[in-house]
Image (tube, grey):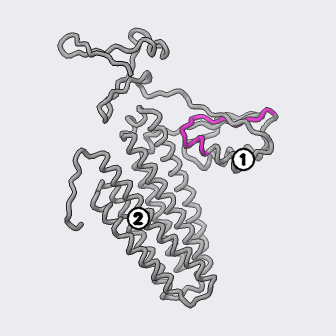
Amino acid sequence: MELRKIQKTGGNTYIVSLPAKWVREQGLQKNTPVGVIPRADGTLLITTKPEGKVATARKEFKVDDNVDENLLFRSLIAAYIVGFSEVKVYSERGLNSRIRRVVREFSSMVIGQEVTDEDPISITVKDLLDPLEMPFEKSIERMHIIVKSMIDDAELYLSVGDEATLEDIVARDNYVDRLNWLISRQSVMALKDPTFVEKMGVSSVTAVIYSFVGKHIERVGDHAVRIAKNLAKVRHRVNNRLSKEIKEALHSAERLFDGAIESLIKGDMSLANEVIESVGETHRRCEELIHALQGGNAEDLLYIGNISDSIRRIGDYSADICESVLNLLVSEAVTCSLSGEEV
């Protein structure tokens, strides 16, 4: 660290000289504008990109004809999440249709990525999304709405057995994945580029915590799908008592999930704590669900056990969301007012 003394010129102007080596490395000259960003920790950030424009982060993947499709797809997702704005897949011998299909599937599975260039040996995908169009709060609220509807429809499927409902639950889970990947991407960009968090109106800590919340919501969506798929195996053999137990357990977990998101949106520490304290009630209902099947056949017990486990997990992930909410609120507040009164 270099120490510099503050100089004062005029009535209210303070000057700090910049390291000459850094100025040369950045290619700066006299009268070149730089950005100065005050930070929450009391430091100042000096950036050579005052308008928030960053160099295009480009990643290239060289592949051969036998590349594993899953490996390629996961690598593309990884490049997306860590913030690359342009991804090129190429082969010196030319790309076959199988590889092109994987790249196009990737483009359709994530938000803001479009194929912008293609020739016999390569295909390029670029990020065309303006981050301000998808702030963290909007993505989280959208994920909550979708996953909540998935849980509701899992209960509906138990009652009516409509196969279209089951298929729609699975389809919506794909969109939840897309939103989770977007939140993860934006949180990484927030860590890399301080001007990004300024534009988004959040701190880097907030961005990281939102990525945790997004992952927890995505897991809740996965368990909504798991519940629906296991219901499909056993629905015709579920009696009224067992159906009632399943619905009550689902309602209990869904209330926790709703409360967790509400605590995040409202910044309510008491509500977050209440949700965490209430997880035991959902666990109890899951145990009652298993007991309701005692004496049934082993196959049904397996499916109901899976359903019970997923409902329990929804409650647990809701508590995890609330722990993230507490972390966020404690990190942001200068003084936290805590009360012993019941909520």
- Mark 1 lies on a secondary structure that is helix
Q: Which residue is mark 1?
A: 101
- Residue 3: image x %, image y %? 33, 18
- Residue 177 vertical position relative to residue 229 in the rendered view, above or below: above
Residue shown at the point (44%, 59%) measured from the top left: 144
Q: Nearer the viewer, residue 143 or 78?
A: 78
Q: Outermost residue, left direction?
A: 11
Q: Quadrant of residue 72?
A: top right
Image quarter in which the N terminus is found = top left
Quadrant in the picture for residue 233: bottom right
- Residue 309 position, x and y percent, is 52, 72
Boundaries of the magenta span: 77-92
Above or below residue 18? Residue 156 is below
Q: Which mark is residue 183?
A: none
Count of residue discs: 2
Q: Is residue 100 magenta?
A: no
The residue depicted at 63 percent of the width and 43 percent of the height is 76
Q: Nearer the viewer, residue 299 or 32?
A: 299
The label shown at residue 257 is 2
